[in-house]
Amino acid sequence: MTEPRRPPRDTQRSRLYRAETPVAGRRFETLADCMRFADSVVGTLWWEARFPERGLGGIPRLRPGQGARQAFYRVDPDGPTITLPRRYRTSGVLLHELAHWALDDDADLPNHGRTFARLLLDATAEFGGVARADALLASYREHRVHVGRPARLGPDGRWRYGWDERLRLGKGRALAIRFSTTGDPHAEASGVFEGYRRGASVLRLLADDGAVTIPARSVWDVRPVALAPLASGGARVAAVDLALPLGGVHVAVGPVE
């Protein structure tokens, strides 16, 4: 048995809302205009290199939100939706809600945490321009919004977000870490993350067969795992937490920042 994991607190939600309000972006007149913009984002190579499982075939359906007080993303019985009352039909709001869709499987991360803030900033730069991204970053700083580290490129050609926030939140927890070495770009390790050594340059992971150290700069993916009960041979194995989908990728455990 493993203890159920509580959802992380969404501590900077209000600050992020205040920070992005002055950087609304382009305004759209109709839902059809909004849909064309969403398609133009999700259909790019930039998006595919980060969220290949979130393609045009599964893009959220847009709802008019008559009577709704705000825009929001949710998963309905017939699929994901984004509700867009008329006043919220802007490129900035759409990028915000598409970011929620992109990170929908990452239930171990805060909804508006460092990873979300980083993704929104990167998407703003890509689809709104550098000037608008600079304005958003300045607003982040004004409102004390914490921003995650940039996505890291894995040997499979995919950029992955959240590795740094999982390490930040994961001390004392079981993690699966994937990293690259000179001889193996797909190296893996699993165990309890004990923290950093030598400043923040080395991660220390406690596995069943002893401590494992991993250079922080070599890490390209981090995922939470559940430690299974002791096997018949007396060895403990790490099991991927089924509540946190991994997109069909085999994971390892460890820490990074």
Image (cartoon, grey):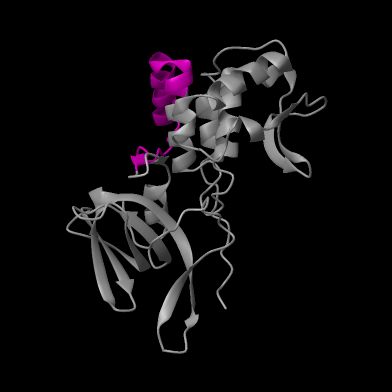
Query: Residue 210, can we see it?
Result: yes
Q: Quadrant of residue 76?
A: top right
Q: Position of residue 134 (x, y in %)?
A: 38, 20
Note whether 35 is above or below 109 in the view shown: above
Note whether 257 is above or below 19 in the view shown: below
The outermost residue toward the right is: 67
Q: Position of residue 41 (x, y in %)?
A: 54, 23
Magenta stretch: includes residue 55 = no
Count of marks overlaid on the render: 0
* Horizontal side of residue 93 vs 177, given as left or right: right
Note whether 194 is above or below 35 in the view shown: below
Q: Which residues are magenta?
A: 124-153
Q: Residue at x 53, y 48 (%)?
A: 110
Is the magenta region chiefly helix, strand or loop?
helix
Q: Residue at x 52, y 25 (%)?
A: 20
Q: Position of residue 235 (x, y in %)?
A: 40, 84
Query: Residue 89, can we see it?
Result: no
Quarter holding the N terminus is bottom right
Q: Residue at x 38, y 51 (%)?
A: 221
Q: Quadrant of residue 36?
A: top right
Q: Position of residue 212 (x, y in %)?
A: 25, 68
Q: Residue at x 29, y 79 (%)?
A: 209
Note whether 10 is above or below 125 in the view shown: below
* Horizontal side of residue 33 vs 194, given as left or right: right
Residue nearest the viewer, comparing 227 with 45? 45
Residue nearest the viewer, comparing 71 with 213? 213
Magenta stretch: includes residue 147 = yes
